[in-house]
Image (cartoon, rainbow, N blue to C red):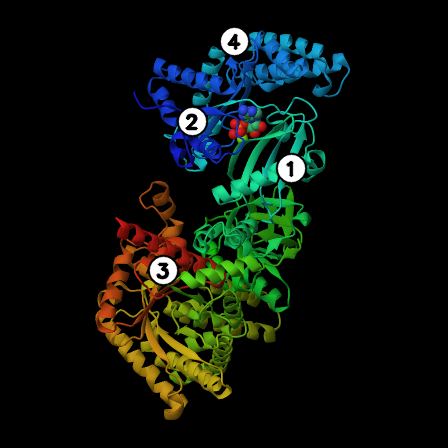
Amino acid sequence: MSTKRVFDFTEGDGEMRSLLGGKGANLAEMTRAGLPVPPGYTITTEACLHYFKRGDLMDDSLKCEIFEAMERLETQKGQRFGGPQNPLLVSVRSGSVTSMPGMMDTILNLGLNDETVQGLADTTGNARFAFDCYRRLIQMFGNVVFGIEHHYFENKLSMLLQKEEVNQEQQLSEEALRQLIEIYKECVIEQAGRPFPQDSRQQLLLAVEAVFKSWHNPRAKYYRKINHISDKQGTAVNIQSMVFGNTGKTSGTGVLFTRNPSTGANELFGEFLYNAQGEDVVAGIRTPLPIAQLEEGMPEVYEQLITAAKQLEQHFKDMQDIEFTVEQGKLYILQTRNGKRNAQAAVRLAVELVHEQVITKNEAIMRIEASHLDQLLHRGLDESKVQNVLAVGLAASPGASTGQLVFDTEQAVEWSKAGKKVILARPETTPEDIQGMLVSEGVFTSRGGLTSHAAVVARGMGRSCVCGCEAVRIDPVNKVMYAGSSVLSEGDWITLDGGTGRIIEGKVPLREAEMSRELEEILRWSDEVRDLRVLANADTPRDAAVARRLGAEGIGLCRTEHMFFSPARLPVVQRMILAESIDERKAALEKILPMQQSDFYELFKSMSGLPVTIRLLDPPLHEFLPNLDELHEQKLYVERQEQLAVLAEEKKALRAERQQISEMIQKVDALQEKNPMLGQRGCRVGIVYPEIYDMQIEAIFKAVSRCLDEGVDVIPELMIPLVGDVTELKVMRELVDRVALQVLGKEKIRYCPYKVGTMIEVPRAALTAKRIAAHADFFSFGTNDLTQMTFGYSRDDAEHKFLAHYLDHKILQHNPFQVLDTEGVGQLIELAVASGRSVKPRIKTGICGEHGGDLKSIFYCHEIGLDYVSCSPYRIPLARIAAAQAAIHYQKEKDITAAV
Ligand code: ADP
Ligand code: MG
Ligand code: MG
């Protein structure tokens, strides 16, 4: 192997991460930038991999390179490694490409032995310090290289402290430290069966090998596994000349964030410990001081530190997490990296760095992560009041919520009507629970994953949700739940945190989500660069108001059926569905009409000036009817009462009730379908029962009319669901036009250029999009159904049965219901867009459904040139940023291609 495997810090730079590791690359970069970094060199990750390839053997040429680099370091420092006078000491530090905490501990003071320790004592005139360094080396070396656990050394140390009658190691005398060294050397022999090596070159090689090998230790392997880091990277090793924070009162060591990592505030944040070395700061033996106190104790050093912090931030264009040491009043920087931060800090930092002209607006936008927004845009808990965490499940839908425990939809509805706040607990949820979820503050389940029904629905509705919480046993029959030793019953207060998956006993105060000034600002910048419009899926005026506040440019999908579920309306809706004659149906519809009309009116008002897309009724009708099993149960119950009844009067009433239930059972049974997803739903209902759509259309235009009268700027768009053949749309469009004219009249209709479009969610619609486009003003891709029908999956069945297995076994890369399948479903979308535009170049196109709030899917929508995405209100800020990120990303790609 002839490639160079050792680089001095002066030879490398920040770009060489994969070869020098993160720490090594940054040490080189800082050296180049003129920061006070003790000199040293880095052994590459390639050398490490080569070492593994040779069966954990170091070849002579590598050893040679290491010692040559050491000679250069000796010259630079004017010291000799292993030299009896003024010896050169080094640290040996691991440094993988991706930072991996806990991989290996650093060895400090390498090069000390019985002879050189005297040399160090002589040159520094501080024997106590020299022996302190030596005893630290023996312990660290014994631990890292020989695997001797720290407690063996620590036991010996405490015995000595006792014998010397002092509390802390700093109080040990020079003589005591000499003794300690002898004791430690004994300890090494006892535990490792070999002595601490006196030859400094041997120390160095053993230490380097130990770093290499630490790549394979179980902690490191586990860390890589859970963080998806490749096992094939290997680690670099940094050898660096020592600086000493333990020489006395004018020295010390510390860590520093250039800004506050939990608020983002522009202030130094960190800790410092006088007269200390290495990890003393974090080890918790002594309490470090807040960094600000350094200003009093060492004003000059503090000044240098501020300058260095600024310089590092400017250089790396980000907040830095710095490790530093002060030796006799002089500052040295030992490490820097981009600091970890929480969501709030991330946003503030990105914005302020733009104001400080360190990064561009586009760079700031690219730094925002989806998870940051999830944390910022939802209610949180007052953490100081969190006490009894009952269990932790899957964090399925962010946001915190608190309420009284209920175990079924009926109770949820009843209590919410009475003005109580409720939390719904279910073993798992089914479509019948939708109503209960709608009125609950939050939902949790003991079974089911992140794609379970509960999770999906809750995310769509913006309710907090914890699912798959297997540590909790939920017994809906007896209305109790068990969590560890706690037993909770209906009505008990409980709190959920959907962002972390915690289920907490009692009522924890909530903290409202807020849009910080910085977040508003970065969202405005995003709006300037994005091409995609961002609309909301909003069904109620309340949702619409939230959506507008979060920046929605209209409503892309209003699911009218959600208006049917409210407890006051459901019975009327059921009467409408179960009607035996058209007159009976019309009578029920007449009752529903004013309710829908007022919903639409409110919706239009809250979206004044922006388009509102209303989808006519979509789900199969039986979804509004009572559950068959429950009806049978009810019937049984009434039967039993009937048998027990004594009074004839009572018997008669019960018999009548039983008959009613029986009739209901018959009707509901008649409406059952073998496969509702592919059955009588969407425009198929509208075509067979035109009076239903008729009523909805009438309600829409009556609301429009009122808006026009009141000067509300209304832009209605009517959307026909589940079209598969052009004639379906043609017939429905005629209905819309007819009713619109009826309601608005010739005059008014001119002031309201409404649109009629269709969902493209049946593959045949995509395939025949050219013909459909002739009758459509817009295409809204219903990617949920389109995915179901393209894959031939029923979503519920897929997610309950085989999808998890498919993902585990990598049959599919992603859940196609979360991340749009660009390869298959995408082809249909692209085809439909192209053929639609071939007849109507300006036909509006977009997607609605969960995909509209997913980062990857949004990138795709941008790439294929859709006009908009529509997503649930709380995803809107994410969608705005994602759309901007997509625009920036593809612009960059274009620039690169143009340059080549
Ligand atoms: P980690 O990756 O665990 O942070 P480091 O290699 O950064 O380990 O070492 C930990 C600490 O050891 C550093 O923060 C620093 O305080 C100390 N240290 C490392 N090298 C030197 C050195 N050459 N001189 C003085 N202290 C050092
Ligand atoms: Mg460490
Ligand atoms: Mg470090």
User: Which mark sits nearer the N-terminus, 3 or 4?
Assistant: 4
- Secondary structure type for disc 3: helix
Query: On the image, numbered disc 1 is attached to which residue?
Result: 302
Q: Is residue 276 above or below residue 482?
A: above
CA gap, disc 3 to disc 2? 47 Å
Query: On the image, numbered disc 3 is attached to which residue?
Result: 784
Position of residue 50 measured from the top left corner of the image (x, y, whole percent): 34, 22
Q: Residue at x 52, y 66 (%)?
A: 639
* Residue that extends furthest to the right in the rendered view of this protein: 165
Query: On the image, numbered disc 4 is attached to which residue?
Result: 197
- Secondary structure type for disc 4: loop
User: Which mark sits nearer the N-terminus, 2 or 4?
Assistant: 4
Q: Nearer the viewer, residue 802 or 609?
A: 609
Query: On the image, numbered disc 2 is attached to which residue?
Result: 236
CA gap, disc 3 to disc 1? 58 Å
Camera-near label (1 vs 4) is: 1
CA neighbours of label 2 inside 10 A, class few (<14), some (14 to 19), many (20+): many
Position of residue 773 measured from the top left corner of the image (x, y, whole percent): 26, 73
The quadrant of the image that shows the N terminus is: top left
Q: Is residue 208 left or right of residue 730?
A: right
Q: Is residue 650 above or below residue 806?
A: below
User: Which mark sits nearer the N-terminus, 3 or 1?
Assistant: 1
Q: Is residue 503 left or right of residue 771?
A: right
